[in-house]
Amino acid sequence: MTSRVRLLALTTLLAACARSGSMPDTARPAPAARSDASLPVLPVARSSAGERVHVLALTPAATATIVLPARIDPARRVDLILYTLPNGNSTAETMGRRLRDSSRWRDDIQHIAAQTRFLRTRGLTQAIVVYLEADARSWPEWRRVQGYPTANARLVALVDELRAQVARLAGHPRDMPVTLTGHSGGGSFMFGWMEGLAAQGQPLPAWLVRIAWLDANYNFAATHGPMLRAWLQGDTTRVLEVLAYDDREIMLDGKKVVADDGGTWRASQRLLTWLATVPEPVVHDTLGVFRRWRAMDGRLEVLLHPNPANRILHTALVGEMNGYAYTMLVRRPGALQQPGEPRVYSAFVDTGVTLPPAVRPPLPPRARDAEGATAFFARVRAMPRQQREAAVQAQLLAGNIPSFLRALRDVTVTATLADGSVHTATFAVMPDYLAIGRDDDWARIPTTPQVAQAFGDAYGFVLPTRKMVNDIWRAATVHGDPRPLTIDRDSAQTVLQHHRLVEAQLRDTLRAPVGAFVAGIKKDVVVTPLLRARTDRVAIFGWHYVDGRPIQPLYTGHVDWYVDYSHGIRLVSRIVTVDGVRMPIERVLADPLLHVLLSDEGPVRVARYQP
C-alpha cells in the first residue's frame, strides 16, 4: 500500500459510511414482500420513556433524528411530525432534558420531547417526531450554501425519503398524516420545501394535515398565499397555525435583534395583508394576551403576542408558553385553551437521551401495495414531463424497485498510476438499470440526472464515469444488442415499449434470467469533468454493441431536463474499495493519482448533478 493510499485510508475511515451500500446477493429475485430483517439494522437508543431513537445522516450536510413510541399498533393512526430546528440549537437541546447545569440553558427552552409525550396523553397516542437539523445548525445558511433552487428541490426529495424511512421503522403504511412545524430558522426549511414543490408544479400534498410556524414565518410572502389557501380548501381537516410576537424593538447588547424590515411580526403583517384579499371571512379577536385572526372556519389561525414589556419571547413562545403543544392540538379533542404559562408538560421532562451515531438511511423495502409498472405507466402516460419526473422520484424514494436490483455486483479494475505503482479498486453496481415495480411487473425507467442524484443521495449511490461504464460492460455476464427507436423518444409509451423490446431479447434470444448482470441495452447517464463548464447539461455515454463498441460517444449536448427511452440509470455504491481500503468514491475520483482507477478523463472533482 502506498503512502497516498495509507493517507486516504486514515482520512476516510472516520468519515466512511456505516453501511457498504451493497444489498443482500441472491441467485434469484427476492419475493415482492420482503422482511425488514433482510435490511440493515439502524443503531437505536432508548429514552427513559422507552422511546426508540434513530439518527439518519442525510445528504448533503443534515441529520434526521427519528423518535418513535416504544410500541406502535399498525392498525391505528400514526401521526408523523416533522420538526425543523431553530438556528443555533442541536437536536439534543431541542429535545430538552431536566436542567442540572445553568450553562446548559439551551436544554431547558423548547422541550419538544416532553411536549410530544404530553401530546400522546391528549389524543396523539402514536405521535412520531423527526427532528431535522442542518449540520451548520442553520437551515437558512444550508439553503444559501446549496443554492436556493437546488436546496428547495433537495428538501422535496428529503421529505419523501423520510416518510418512507419512518414507515419502515414504524411498520405502518406510508400515507400516515404529516405535520410540518418548526421554530425560528426552521421556517426556512418549511418555505424552501413549499417553493420546491411549486417549482415542480406540485401543490401541497394531501398527506400534509397541519402546518405550524412557531415564530418561524420570516420568509412568508404573498406568493405563498394561494398555495396555502388551495391546500386548506382541499380538506376541512387541514390546519394552518402561526404563532409569533412583536419583535420590532427587541434589543440585545444594545442592538436591535431584527432588521427594520425583518422579524416575524412584520412577516405576520404580510400574511394578514394577503389574508384580507381572500374571499373567506376573517374574524379578529383576542385569545388571552394574544391578538388572534381566524379564517376558513378557524382552520387558519394567526396568534400574535403584542409584547408590551418588550421581552425576548422567541423561545418562550415554544417552551414556556406551550406553543408547540398548543399548535399541535388545535381543533383536536385534547386541545389547550390557549398558549401560556405554566408548562403543561413538566411531568414528562426526563434526563435526556444519548443519541446513537448517525448512519446513512437504508433503501426501504418495497411496500406490499406499491404500484406495479403497468399501473404506474398508465397513471403517468398523459402527465407533462415535470409532473412525471416528480412521480418517478416519489416511487423510487419509497423503495418501489424490483428486488433483484438490491443485489449489487462487484466490478474490479486494476491500473498503473502516474508514479508507476499498480493498484486495484472494486466498486459495486446494480446488475441492471434502475426500474420501477414489483418482480412480476416491472420496467426500466430512465430519469433526469436530478432524479437519479436525489435517489443516490438518499441511499448511498453515485452515477458512473465513462471509464466505469466500459468496465461494467466488460464485467457483465449478459450483453444485449442495442434496440433503437425513433418516434416519440421521450414519451412514457416509448419508454415502456423499449423495455419490452429489451426484455424480449433477453428472455427469448439470450435466455438470461431475471436479475442477470446485463449491459449493452441503454445509454448511461454519467458524470464527467465536462459538466463543470456545462452545468445545465446531462452527459450520456455507451449503449454498446456486442463487440464492445459504444453507439453513443460521451455527449453533453442535451439540456439537463431532457430524458428519453434510450437513457439508463446504472447506480454505483458510493463506497469503493482501493487496495483493501474502503473510501468514498468521490475522493478517489478527485485524487490526482488514484482517479485513473475510475476515470479516463483526468480527475473528476464534481462527481454529481445538483438535484
Image: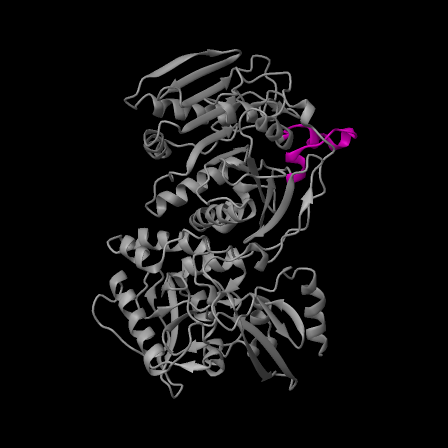
In the figure, 7 relative to 230: above or below? below
Horizontal relation, residue 307 to residue 46: left or right: left
Furthest residue in direction right, as rendered = 101
User: Which of these two is toward me, 460 or 317?
Assistant: 460
Horizontal relation, residue 99 to residue 488: left or right: right
User: Which of these two is toward me, 514 or 484?
Assistant: 514
Residue beneath the point at 40% across and 24% down: 300
In the figure, 379 relative to 466: above or below? above
Horizontal relation, residue 134 to residue 440: left or right: right
Where residue 457 appears, x then y in whole percent? Answer: 51, 57
In the figure, 397 relative to 5: above or below? above
Residue beneath the point at 37% across and 34% down: 224
Where residue 298 appears, x then y in whole percent? Answer: 39, 19
Horizontal relation, residue 4 to residue 215: left or right: right
In the figure, 420 relative to 210: above or below? below
- Span colored in magenta: 90-111
Where residue 79 appears, x then y in whole percent? Answer: 50, 35
Where's the C terminus, which quadrant?
A: bottom left
Q: How was the colour assigned to the protein in this rendering?
A: one colour
* Residue 382 visible: yes
How many numbered marks have been drawn onto this rendered protein structure? 0
Q: Is residue 374 found inside the magenta-colored segment of the image? A: no
Where's the N terminus, which quadrant?
A: bottom right
Furthest residue in direction left, as rendered = 487
User: Which of these two is toward me, 406 or 570?
Assistant: 406
* Residue 611 visible: no
Where residue 13 appears, x then y in whole percent? Answer: 69, 64
> Dividing the picture into quarters, in which one does residue 603 lie?
bottom right
> Dividing the picture into quarters, in which one does residue 574 lie?
bottom right
> Dividing the picture into quarters, in which one does residue 227 lie?
top left
Residue beneath the point at 53% across and 12% down: 289
